[in-house]
Image (spheres, grey):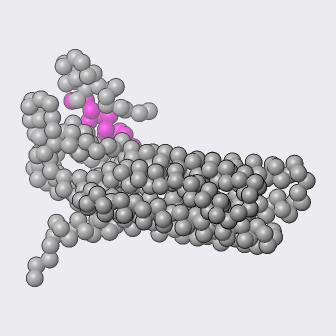
């Protein structure tokens, strides 16, 4: 069962609204989890803060899960980029049959990477929301939370003071224990691993279409398996690695305090990192495919290992480094 405040509490009748607000503690006390669908204005809304404070007071052992909405936006940027790349790669293969000239293939590959460059720019803008989330937690101040009615503001402030002793104590709770709890839930801030099959689906579909074509043409089973291991699975893992590196760099360079020229340079460098990663994977994939089934299987296993390591390394490092930075700012050393 789900309690969604906007539909579970009457938003029109003041009397029913008051009854719903005063009864929210009963719902929160029996809820196993409080899931926050976070967007940029969340920490500035006093009623949202009230629900957060009430849940932890009524349910000290309950789970608070932050589900930022930017994660799905990041997934869409990645999926759209790979869809564009897959379509243009298919075009490049058609042109390669018409002409074996190296310059033409180089131009086609460069054009195929253009959707990725657009995706990088959108990704950097989207991940700026992630930076804002961490900054909001580090610099939270209850006094700055907005509320439409003064009576509601007074009610919420009195409730929080009664639960936590003072508004300052609640502010310290959000900046300290709550922030640590949320930052150490890596799945809240990164693209969930189960999304990656969806992201690489356009490429996998195109690769399997080639397998069907080879099968229809009477290719030996060793060629078919080599194509699946080297081209379908192996190259897919390199795409995931490239996207993870892109997301990592996009997040690290997300702050908007830099000049426009430096932002462009950062986007170009991020794009080049992703393009070079995928190009290296494609080169190794083609070389393995040409050498036979054994090399294709070996390439596939090595690629899976590399991608697994990259996913593990890049999951929490940005949040942990930012957390340490916030701790230094809040508790500067005396010397």
Would residue 178 be visible to someone looking at this image? Answer: no
Residues 98 and 292: in front is 98
Residues 184 and 287: in front is 287
Q: Where residue 8 appears, x then y in whole percent? A: 33, 26
Is residue 27 inside the magenta stretch?
Answer: yes
Residues 242 and 300: in front is 242
Seen in the image, is 104 located left or right of residue 13?
Answer: right
Q: In the image, what residue occupies the spot 76% across and 54% down?
A: 98
Is residue 197 inside the magenta stretch?
Answer: no
Q: Which residues are magenta?
A: 22-35
Q: In the image, what residue occupies the spot 26% across and 42% down?
A: 42
Which quadrant would the N terminus be assigned to in this image?
Answer: top left
Q: In the image, what residue occupies the spot 15% across and 38% down?
A: 146
Q: Where residue 160 appears, x then y in whole percent? A: 15, 43
Seen in the image, is 92 located left or right of residue 52?
Answer: right
Please determine whether, in this image, residue 327 is positioned above or below residue 118: below
Q: Where residue 97 appears, x then y in whole percent? A: 76, 55
Q: Where residue 328 appears, x then y in whole percent? A: 20, 71
Identity of the residue furthest to the bottom in this view: 335
Seen in the image, is 273 located left or right of residue 86?
Answer: left
Would residue 83 be visible to someone looking at this image? Answer: yes
Q: In the image, what residue occupies the spot 33% across and 44% down?
A: 38
Seen in the image, is 282 located left or right of residue 191?
Answer: right
Residues 217 and 23: in front is 217
Residue 100 falls in which quadrant of the image?
bottom right
Which quadrant would the C terminus be assigned to in this image?
Answer: bottom left
């Amino acid at each position: 069962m789900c309690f969604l405040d906007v539909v579970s509490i009457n938003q029109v009748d003041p009397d029913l609204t008051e009854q719903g607000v005063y009864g929210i503690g009963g719902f929160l006390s029996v809820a196993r989890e409080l899931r926050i669908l976070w967007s940029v204005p969340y920490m500035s809304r006093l009623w949202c803060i009230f629900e957060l404070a009430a849940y932890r007071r009524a349910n000290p052992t309950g789970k608070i899960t932050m589900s930022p909405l930017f994660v799905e936006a990041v997934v869409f940027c990645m999926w759209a980029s790979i869809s564009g790349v897959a379509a243009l790669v298919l075009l490049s293969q058609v042109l390669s049959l018409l002409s074996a000239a190296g310059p033409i293939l180089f131009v086609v590959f460069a054009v195929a990477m253009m959707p990725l460059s657009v995706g990088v720019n959108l990704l950097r803008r989207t991940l700026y929301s992630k930076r804002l989330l961490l900054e909001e937690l580090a610099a939270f101040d209850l006094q700055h939370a907005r509320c439409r009615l003064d009576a509601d503001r007074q009610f919420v402030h009195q409730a929080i003071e009664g639960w936590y002793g003072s508004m300052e104590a609640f502010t310290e709770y959000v900046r300290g224990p709550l922030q640590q709890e949320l930052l150490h839930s890596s799945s809240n801030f990164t693209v969930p691993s189960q999304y990656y099959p969806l992201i690489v689906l356009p490429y996998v579909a195109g690769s399997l279409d080639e397998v069907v074509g080879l099968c229809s043409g009477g290719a030996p089973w060793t060629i078919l398996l080599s194509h699946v291991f080297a081209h379908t699975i192996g190259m897919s893992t390199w795409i995931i690695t490239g996207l993870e590196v892109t997301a990592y760099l996009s997040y690290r360079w997300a702050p908007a305090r830099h000049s426009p020229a430096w932002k462009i340079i950062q986007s170009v460098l991020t794009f080049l990192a992703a393009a070079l990663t995928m190009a290296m994977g494609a080169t190794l994939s083609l070389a393995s495919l040409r050498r036979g089934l054994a090399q294709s299987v070996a390439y596939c296993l090595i690629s899976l290992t590399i991608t697994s390591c990259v996913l593990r390394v890049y999951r929490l490092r940005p949040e942990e480094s930012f957390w340490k930075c916030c701790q230094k700012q809040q508790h500067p050393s005396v010397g």
